[in-house]
Image (spheres, grey):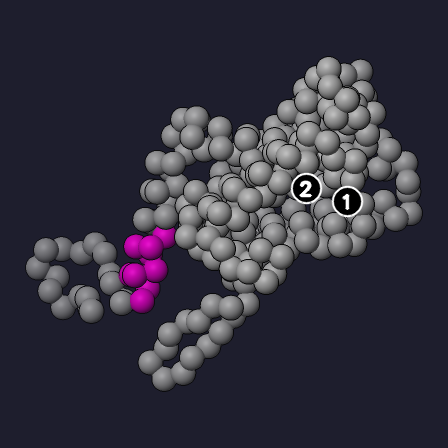
Amino acid sequence: MRRYPSPNVSSYSFGPGPISTALKALISANVAMFVAQLFLRQITETLGLIPAEVVRLHIWQLGTYMFLHGNLSHILFNMLALWMIGGELERIWGSRYFLKFYFVTGVGAAVLTVLFSLLPFTFASALYDSNIIGASGAIYGLLLAYAIYFPNRPIYLWFLFPVPAKIFVAILGAIAFLSSLGSTSGVANATHLGGLLVGYLFLKGGNLHPLAEVKYRYLKWKINRVRKKFDVYSGGRADDWDRRVH
C-alpha cells in the first residue's frame, strides 16, 4: 500500500502503479498459454523445457518454457511477482532494457538447468528427462535486481514477516541451492538458482554498463517528477525572468 501526499487529502493505491504495455504483453502471453494448456496437453509436452530434448536440438524450449505453468496458483504468484517487482524496475530501466533483462535471465536459467542436468550426480540427472515449466527463472532474476537496487525495501516472507529485500533474496537463494541438491518435490530449484546467478552476472558483468544506465534512467525519472511537481520550465533566454519556477 503506497501513500501519496496531497495538500488537502490523502490517497492510496495498491501495488507499484499502472501496468505498462510491456507488462501487459508478458502477463497476457502467460495467461493465454495457460488457458491453451488446459485444452491441449501437447503444448506442455512440446514447449516445456526438457533437457534431454534440448540436447537433441529442441532449442526453442529454452524460451517457450517461460510461458507455461502447472496450475492456477503457479501462474498467479508468478504474475503477481512480475507486476509488483517488474513494474518498478521497468520504470527505472525503461521497457527495452527490462524486456532484455527478463528474457536473458529466463533463457539463461534454462541453459544452466540443462547444463546442471548433465552433471554426474543423481540429484542433477533427475532433471534430465523432466519437463520444467514456469516463469520463475526470470522472476528470480527480477528479485535479484530488486534486491540490488532496493536492498532495504521490506518484502513479506510467506506474506507474514517483513524482511529487507536483500535478506529475502538471500533466503530464496539458500533454499534453491539446498533444494537443488536433493529435491524430489517436482520444483526445478536449479532453474530458480540459475535465474539468480544469470541476473547477478548480467547486472555486474559490464554488459553495456547496465548499472550506469540504470542510475541515469533513475535520476532522469526523479528529475522529471520534480519538474512536474514544482512546475519547473526548462529552456528560454537568460533574461526570460518571468518564467514560473517554484
* Earlier residue among tags 2 and 1: 1
Q: Secondary structure at mark 1?
A: loop
Which quadrant is home to the C terminus? bottom left
Q: Is residue 225 magenta?
A: yes
Numbered mark located on residue 219 in the image: none
Residue under numbered circle 1: 69
Q: How many marks?
A: 2
Tell me if mark 2 has few (under 14), some (14-19) or many (20+) residues whose alpha carbon lies within 10 angstroms of its own.
Answer: many
User: In the rendered structure, which segment of residues is drawn in magenta?
Assistant: 221-229
Q: Furthest-bottom residue in view?
A: 8
Q: Say above or below: 28 vs 243.
A: above
Q: Kindly indicate the quadrant of the structure image that contains residue 127.
A: top right
Give the CA distance from mark 2 to mark 1. 8 Å
Q: Is residue 95 magenta?
A: no
The kind of residue tagged 2 is: Ala
49 sits left or right of 200 in the view: right
Q: Is residue 236 visible?
A: yes
**Location of residue 63 in the rendering, given as x and y in whole percent from the top left corner:** 69, 31
Do labels 2 and 1 touch, CB within 8 Å? yes
Residue under numbered circle 2: 135
In front here: 196 or 219? 196
